[in-house]
Amino acid sequence: MATHLITGAGSGIGAVVAERLLARGDDTWLLARNAARAKELADRFDGAHTLVGDLAEPERLSWALSHQALPETLDSLHHIAGVIELGEIGDTSAKVWNTMLAANLVAPAELTRLLLPQLRQARGHVLFVNSGAGLRANPHWGAYAASKHGLKALADALRGEEGGNGVRVTSVYPGRTATPMQEKVHRLEGKEYDAEKWVTPEAVATTLLTALDLPRGSEVTDLSVRPGG
């Protein structure tokens, strides 16, 4: 039985990944921002374990995890959680920059660092849900895109550093996906939201698990998922 840890399991892509891993009988751990959220996740995902750690405060993750029982080995770590705000560079405050960089980049780096012993033990797999914004930056998306470009750099460096330890690293770049975050993006853009136009969370989850299930000795490094007919 494989062991996995997922961030962002409360909705969208993360929820689908959690459901599928639990359905196949795997030992599934879900990271929650606080104890109340952990209870919600435990009630929703029968059989899942929960850990508490706030990705908005990556400097506190080490302390938080040191006070909880962790899995002994980890076959995969799924970085799915993220936050977004839009705005022109000239209107984006340092506080907004720091909020997005903390949750979207520094927290994944720190969580990976803290769990590398378990990942190395299992010759595990780190999977980053990035974004099309991690490959190109459009107007109004500067701070978010910067955090996602940084996430690509993190994944690429980690792959080079940990390949010798048997740790695989995959980045997935979804286009617009029908999630609560996408609803927020449409509100920020002043546009009407139609989920039918966008990639489904199930499609992105399938992409992640396809990369995860690739036979040992091969590795998918980067995958883009786009809406299609």
Image: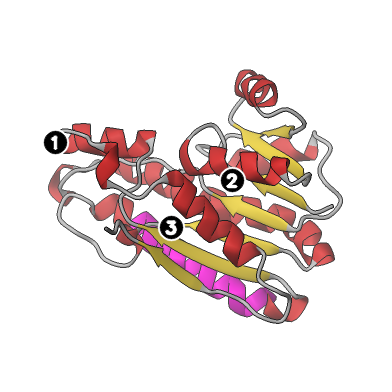
Is residue 157 covered in magenta?
A: yes
Residue matched to label 1: 191
> Given the image, on which type of amino acid does mark 3 rest?
Asn
Q: Earlier in the sequence, mark 3 or mark 1?
A: 3
In-image side of 9 versus 134 (left or right): right
Query: In the rendered image, which residue does mark 2 sit on?
Result: 17
Identified at 65% across, 80% down, the residue is 218
Q: Amino acid at mark 2?
A: Val
- The spot of residue 102 in percent (x, y) is 46, 46
Q: Does the magenta stretch mainly form a helix, a strand or a loop?
A: helix
What's the distance in space between the residues labelled 3 and 1, CA to CA? 23 Å
- The picture places residue 103, in percent across and down from the top left corner, at 47, 44
Residue tagged 3: 130
- Circles 3 and 1 in contact, beta carbons < 8 Å: no
Lateral position of residue 5 relative to residue 87, left or right = right
Q: Nearer the viewer, residue 221 or 210?
A: 210
User: How far separated are the C-alphas under marks 1 and 2?
Assistant: 28 Å
Q: Is residue 198 magenta?
A: no
Colour logic? secondary structure
The picture places residue 112, in percent across and down from the top left corner, at 65, 56
Q: Disc 1 marks which amino acid? A: Lys
**Mark 3 or 1, which is nearer the eye?**
1
